[in-house]
Image: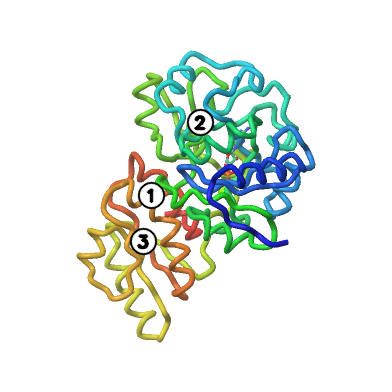
Amino acid sequence: MNTKILEIDKNSLKLSKEIIEDAGAVAFPTETVYGLGANAFNTSAVENIFKIKGRPNDNPLIVHVHKDYDLNTLVDYVPDYAVRLAKAFLPGPLTMVYKSKGKVSSAVSCGLDTLAVRIPSHNGAQTFLKYLDLPIAAPSANVSKHVSPTSAEHVFNDLNGKIELILDGGKCSGGIESTVLDCTGEIPVVLRSGLVTREMIEKVAGFCTEYAYKEGVAARSPGMKYKHYSPACRTGLYAYNERQLAINEYNAEHGKGVNVYIMCDGKTAKEIGVDHILNLGFTENEIAANLYSKLREGEKVAELIIAIAPEKQDGVMAGVMNRLKKACGSNL
Ligand code: AMP
Ligand code: MG
């Protein structure tokens, strides 16, 4: 199969509709990362996504809809705080989990009685979803466990030959996956941190807690138990206040002839002044937007990436830390 990369226009939309209606999958841009979308009503289309990615079949998918889609057709109970949150943050990088009406294929939520729904703000995503006017089940458009894609080229590098079409909407501005928020209880619970932060949710809803996954206990968000976002090379991760240890390891590995890079924010990069740097940028949003492209750039040039955690750990950096820990297989 030849994989085409096309800008979003009349012709590519028409082609994407043919593919989706034929139970196929299309990669499309969102403001967080690129998604691999299929018709959520069609079980074989949804199962095909798991196959293409090599995704474990107990890790449920998020359904994407356009901003005028009537959510009441898909989910049952939307609490007051969820209505306020939707007003404040949607369309945007916030996925909300509700009680499902069971209208989409049960393969989407892997048999759970809940459904995760997202309304992306990216213009291209909205155009694509509006044109199809269907709920589109979509995980990130990467091979399972690899780094999520933030450009059409990243998708191509992972899925060339496995899908027919990648809709190109440029580089994703957000860079890390959406916040996943459980809205099935009295209090919203963050299942996965992202650009809509716990602090932002608390301000609007009045309350919000964060779910901590414990090994050996059934995960409320099954994706949490899997290794994720990993580059192909070896990795290490040091806390900000242990950055001298990162520099020591860099020097030791460099001395052994290992091609090693340090990944850190712009301010830290200036301070430590080593030659091989993957610089994530200065602001919180820059760091989130660059994280995956720097991991993908790093795996091409380095045998070892040593990451130094950002000094700040709350807000958007909570999401960045979550991804960094998973990318580096670290419990830091
Ligand atoms: P990805 O598609 O790779 O962005 O991952 C989707 C994330 O959403 C995973 O962490 C899933 O576990 C989570 N998710 C999807 N559907 C549900 C659901 N119904 N309940 C809880 N978490 C969900
Ligand atoms: Mg993913």
Disc 1 secondary structure class: helix
Viewer-nearest residue: 184 or 142: 142
Side (left or right) of 61 relative to 247? right
Sequence-first tag of 1 and 3: 3
Q: Nearer the viewer, residue 221 or 217?
A: 221
The extreme top residue here reads: 80
- Near mark 3 (Cα within 10 A), the count class, few <14, some 14-19 or many ≥20, is many
Dot 2 alpha-carbon crowd within 10 angstroms: few under 14, some 14 to 19, many 20 or more: many
Kindly report which numbered mark, 2 or 1, lies closer to the viewer in this rendering.
Answer: 1
Q: Residues within 10 Å of mark 1 (few under 14, many from 20)?
A: many
Tell me: residue 331, above or below residue 74: below
User: Residue at position x 51%, y 59% from top?
Assistant: 329
The amino acid type found where label 1 is placed reads Ala
Q: Looking at the image, in which quadrant does ligand 1 appear?
A: top right
Q: Quadrant of the C terminus?
A: bottom left
Residue indicated by mark 2 = 181
Q: CA distance from mark 1 to mark 3?
A: 18 Å
> Ligand 2: does it lie within 8 Å of the C-beta at label 3?
no
Which element type, helix, strand or loop, lies under badge 2? strand
Identify residue type, mark 3.
Tyr
Name which of mark 2 and mark 1 comes first in the sequence. Answer: 2
Distance from mark 2 CB to nearest ligand 1 atom below 8 Å: no
Q: Which residue is mark 1?
A: 288
Question: In the picture provided, is 11 more to the left or to the right than 284?
Answer: right
- Between the residue at mark 2 and the residue at mark 3, the CA separation in whole angstroms equals 29 Å
Q: Residue at x 62, y 55 (%)?
A: 144
CB under 8 Å between discs 2 and 1: no
Q: Residue at x 30, y 61 (%)?
A: 242
| Cα gap from disc 2 to disc 1, whole angstroms | 19 Å
- Relative to 144, say whether 209 is above or below: above
Q: Which residue is mark 3?
A: 238
